[in-house]
């Protein structure tokens, strides 16, 4: 979330306008705000809502990440829940429009709020919350900052009722766990530090569909919050997963696999080479922020918002090679 996108005052004004509309229009307006998210069935029983190619703002209500669910014979698994309870409620409404089966699992691919803040909407279903072994610690450390940021850039109303809902079942880096939905098995795999230090992927064996979380960005520039070299290592591991299509954390609802990895792999290697060259020439971080990765600018949405941060993270990491 970029700190310079919106000032708090316009956010407050927007929140007041929304509140006034709800008061004027009554239950119809409130109902519309909780209407089911649109979803696409990308494979039999596998549904995905594609988030906006934007940073969070009042207009999108934080709905910027790809969210999904998988329907088995006996139950449902939810994969990521959105950036606010309202987004989570709308995802839940989309699920209930497709099936009356109970929600067995809510799986968070990593800690970022656009993938976890909707967890609150599913607490009443009493599912197992599933995530990386390091997810709970990351949630506890970052929740106050994420909550403050959501209030600033989306509005106070969006943050109402948010809780840090930690996993009740975990998977460590390099390990797998199997989740049974009845007639289909989901394999949840934990990764070492890459996009974050708490990334997991989910493979539906029935349709060979991989939910890659934010280990895969398509069209929208990747956001580095872990390790550049670790992410490149994760890419090599991802290529070995026997999937036919993938759901990226940000991008289209589904993409062919494994070729969907090509663009982010190219970007990471460009970033790695540019930064190493600048450091070899004793260049500064400021110089790296101005130059590194510049050849990729026209290839990604939100490049100027996120590339400087990616350069900063990678520069510090590579200084210690």
Image (cartoon, grey):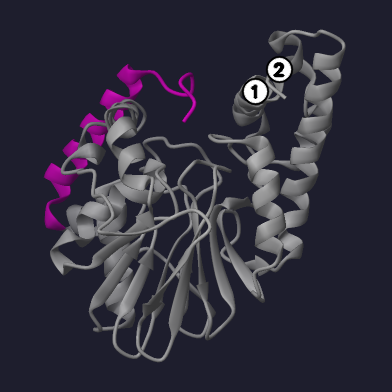
* Residue at 53% from the left image edge and 72% from the top image edge: 203
Residue receiving disc 2: 289
Residue extent of the magenta highlight: 1-27
Residue 255 placement, left or right of 175: right
Residue 191, how many percent across, how many down? 53, 53
Q: Name the one closer to the observer, 43 or 257.
A: 257
Element under disc 2: helix
Residue 150, how many percent across, how many down? 32, 33
Q: Residues within 10 Å of mark 2 (few under 14, many from 20)?
A: some
Q: Name the one closer to the observer, 139 or 42.
A: 139
Q: Which mark is residue 308?
A: 1
Q: Residues within 10 Å of mark 1 (few under 14, many from 20)?
A: some
Q: Name the one closer to the observer, 287 or 57.
A: 287
Q: Quadrant of the C terminus?
A: top right
Q: Is residue 238 visible?
A: yes
Q: Is residue 83 visible?
A: no
* Residue at 74% from the left image edge and 39% from the top image edge: 268
Residue 9, how many percent across, how many down? 31, 17
């Amino acid at each position: 979330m970029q700190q310079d996108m919106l000032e708090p005052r316009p956010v407050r004004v927007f929140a007041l306008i929304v509140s006034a509309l709800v008061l004027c229009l009554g239950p119809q307006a409130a109902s519309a705000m909780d209407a089911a998210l649109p979803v696409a069935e990308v494979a039999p029983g596998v549904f995905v809502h594609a988030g906006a190619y934007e940073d969070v703002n009042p207009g999108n209500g934080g709905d910027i990440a790809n969210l999904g669910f998988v329907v088995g014979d006996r139950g449902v698994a939810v994969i990521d829940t959105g950036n606010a309870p309202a987004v989570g409620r709308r995802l839940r409404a989309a699920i209930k429009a497709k099936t009356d089966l109970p929600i067995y699992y809510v799986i968070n691919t990593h800690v970022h709020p656009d993938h976890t803040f909707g967890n609150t909407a599913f607490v009443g279903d009493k599912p197992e919350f599933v995530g990386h072994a390091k997810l709970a610690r990351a949630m506890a450390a970052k929740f106050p900052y994420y909550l403050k940021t959501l209030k600033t850039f989306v509005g106070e109303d969006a943050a109402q009722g948010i809780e840090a809902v930690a996993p009740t079942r975990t998977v460590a880096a390099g390990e797998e766990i199997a989740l049974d939905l009845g007639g289909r098995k989901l394999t949840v795999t934990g990764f070492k530090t890459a996009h974050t230090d708490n990334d997991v992927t989910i493979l539906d064996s029935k349709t060979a569909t991989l939910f890659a979380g934010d280990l895969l960005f398509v069209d929208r520039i990747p956001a580095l919050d872990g390790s550049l070299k670790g992410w490149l290592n994760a890419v090599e591991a991802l290529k070995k997963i026997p999937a036919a299509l993938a759901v990226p954390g940000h991008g289209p609802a589904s993409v062919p696999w494994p070729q969907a990895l090509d663009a982010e792999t190219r970007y990471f290697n460009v970033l790695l080479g540019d930064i190493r060259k600048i450091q070899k020439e004793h260049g500064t971080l400021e110089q790296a922020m101005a130059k590194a990765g510049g050849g990729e600018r026209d290839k990604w949405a939100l490049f100027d918002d996120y590339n400087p941060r990616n350069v900063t993270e990678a520069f510090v990491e590579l200084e210690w090679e």
